[in-house]
Image (cartoon, rainbow, N blue to C red):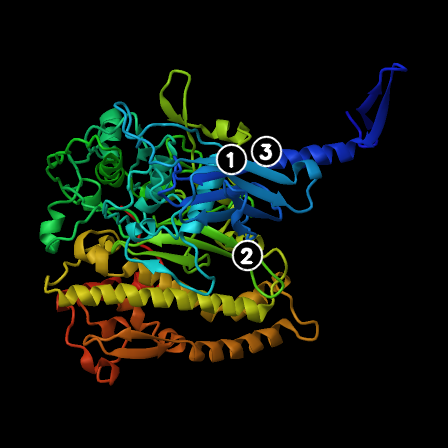
Amino acid sequence: MIRSHRFLAIVTACLPAVGVCVVSLLPIANARAQAAACEDAAELAVLPSPLAPWKGAPLRVIFAAEKPMTGELSLIAPNGQVAARSSERRGGPPYFWFAEIAAPAAGKWQARLVRANAPAECRTITREIAVAATQPPRPGGVRNSVWPIRNSWNRTAENLYSAWIEKLFEAPLDASPSWPALHVVLRDPARNALHNHLGLREDQINLYIRPDCADLPYFLRAYFAFKMGLPYGYAKCTRGGGGKPPRCPVWWNIEKEEPQPEAPEDIIAAAEGPPQGAPAQQRSPGGLFDIFKPQQPAQTPETRAGQRSQKTASRTTPGFAIPPTGPVAKPKAPVRPPRPTSLALGFGHYLQFSVADGVHSGAGRTLAAHEGSDFYTVPLTQENLRPGTVYADPYGHLLIIAKRVPQTQGNAGVFLAVDAQPDGTVARKRFWRGNFLFAQDPALGDAGFKRFRPVVRDKGGSLRRLTVAEISKNPNYADFSLDQTKLAVEDFYDRMDDVMSPDPLDPVRAMREAITSLEEQVKARVTSIENGRKYQLSGKGEASMPDGAAIFETTGAWEDFATPSRDLRLLIAMDVVRHFPDRVARRPERYAMPKDKSPDQVKAELQAVLTQELSARTFSYPRSDGSPWTLSLKDVIDRIVDLEMAYNVNDCVELRWGAKDGSDEAATCKRRAPQAQRAKMTDYREWFSERRRPPRT
């Protein structure tokens, strides 16, 4: 073994006249440090956009690094002048800089990163970028792939993917940004560093991209892979049930497209035979799902339901479908139109007719070591919970990490994530117990933080995903872990607290952070309820309410505008805030407790602050006639029992916010859900009062 006290001989000069060389002896530790610094520089990932820069398109540059460093990014024009500079280092990890030139001059540009506190020979990292005077030839499609593959997944590509995700959903920490659909974000050149990256005006051809929570991770990964020329695919997975977690029996990719929609349950049944005593041909209903919505006359829920595909007809609001109780005739598979030869339109077709129709949230709940899954579980560390990492909760909702905000002396650390809702809304939210549900139940599969398996080309030329063993050994990844599967629920949330904020937290500040998270969740509900009010005003009629556990898992207007899953999460969130003083008393070692106060005294102080904060934080919602009504968070907490039956889109807005009959607030209420629906809600109320999802049968 080489010890650290050994020395490395470096020849610095030779004197031929005397036949000797002058040798400088440096400690090997210093030599290694210099080598490591230069190696860090070599690991920098640089992304100029567009793919073929020219003077008629904005030039955007991302420098991404695996390890933290301080520096400044400059874009140097052909005349040697600094045209743009940025010393703002984002992310962590990966860490990245971004700079942009709206109208670059033709010629040879330089993207230059000057690093502070680096060895002189490695301090300045420069990449040359040729900007053409005329528009380069536009890329085209290829016969055997949805898009041409130019690159491969590795640490560089993953770091750029993380940087792209973070910039896409950037907003101040105290903001609660939301967008009516994903295409609104992607069309924004100030957010999307890959806007029109291919030079095809591909982000200006009005693709209407409206993923639900299950689609969003797949759509973002597909979009980045399409722009960067990376391989891509998706698994067809069951939704689980009968005590079994989801399984993924088949995988399709851009070079081997799925020929026709086929339920994975059918694939497994064909391989294993139907279960003993099961009725033949138990199938889910089908139709065609339109995620690229051109502006056209609105459809009724009944008309839309008839157009949905085999997957989306049983699409879930957070996650999975209830099998039919009796034999159902298998529908005819929808006719899939041929994919356009145009590269951009072909990508849109692939999202619409392959990815959206093929994936659902069951894919996120597979067992951690299931080789058929598109995901693998990672360690709960700051280094591994990067933007682009997916969170799968046990009931099927999926979120994507968008940013990590490190802990400071005054504030707790925060993970920010984005998710999509059935009404198409995409929103950013904080990691906390109210948004990220966790449970350990073998029948549900493995919840937790997961990353996409990299897609590679095998020796035979076909695309495939890396196995768990290969990921563990691959130096670009090496981050597979089963740790999350071994944690109890409280241990999981305690571990995440430690990851977000390694140092003890001031208990009052920590509680205020929890109240802020609740406030964000309540304000997000304002948007959801308002969408339901607009649906009521559209004259499309009453939304059908499903039976039993299907209230969480249905389609049509109920899926889009009723809020049983979101309200269940909100109830859990309110419990977290209400009982926060008890949590501090339970785990005082996690907090920077005042030395002169006992845990009981701190608990009493927190209770007083909690009451004050909940009363001071207010919001407004539009009542049935559009007039605003203001509530405080305390009002919401006080109505916690009423909010257990406030999810029905057929009820007036006032009732959905827990307004009391006969109150001034409820005076504008003109609508009630049918009595039969209210009766069902009464029967199902225990699920909400006990804060649990009913099991699948």
- Of tags 1 and 3, which is closer to the observer? 1
Mark 2, Cα crowd under 10 Å, few <14 / some 14-19 / many 20+, is many
Type of the residue with mark 2: Asp
Task: Report the side of 644 relative to 675 (left or right).
Answer: right
Q: Which residue is mark 3?
A: 42
Tell me the residue at 30%/68% (across/down): 526
Above or below residue 48? Residue 589 is: below
- Of tags 2 and 1, which is closer to the observer? 1
User: What is the x, y in percent for residue 494?
Assistant: 54, 55
Give SS at disc 2: helix
Above or below residue 399? Residue 368 is: above
Give SS at disc 1: strand
Q: Earlier in the sequence, mark 2 or mark 1?
A: 1
Tell me the residue at 13%/49% (across/down): 305
Q: Earlier in the sequence, mark 3 or mark 2?
A: 3
Farthest residue, direction right: 18
Q: Which residue is mark 2?
A: 497
Q: Which residue is mark 1?
A: 128
Mark 1, Cα crowd under 10 Å, few <14 / some 14-19 / many 20+, is few
Above or below residue 62? Residue 524 is: below
Can see residue 143?
yes
Tell me the residue at 42%/39% (across/down): 106
User: What is the x, y in percent for residue 220?
Assistant: 36, 43
Tell me the residue at 55%/51% (across/down): 89
In three-dimensional space, the C-alpha distance between marks 1 and 3, rounded to whole angstroms, equals 15 Å
Type of the residue with mark 1: Glu
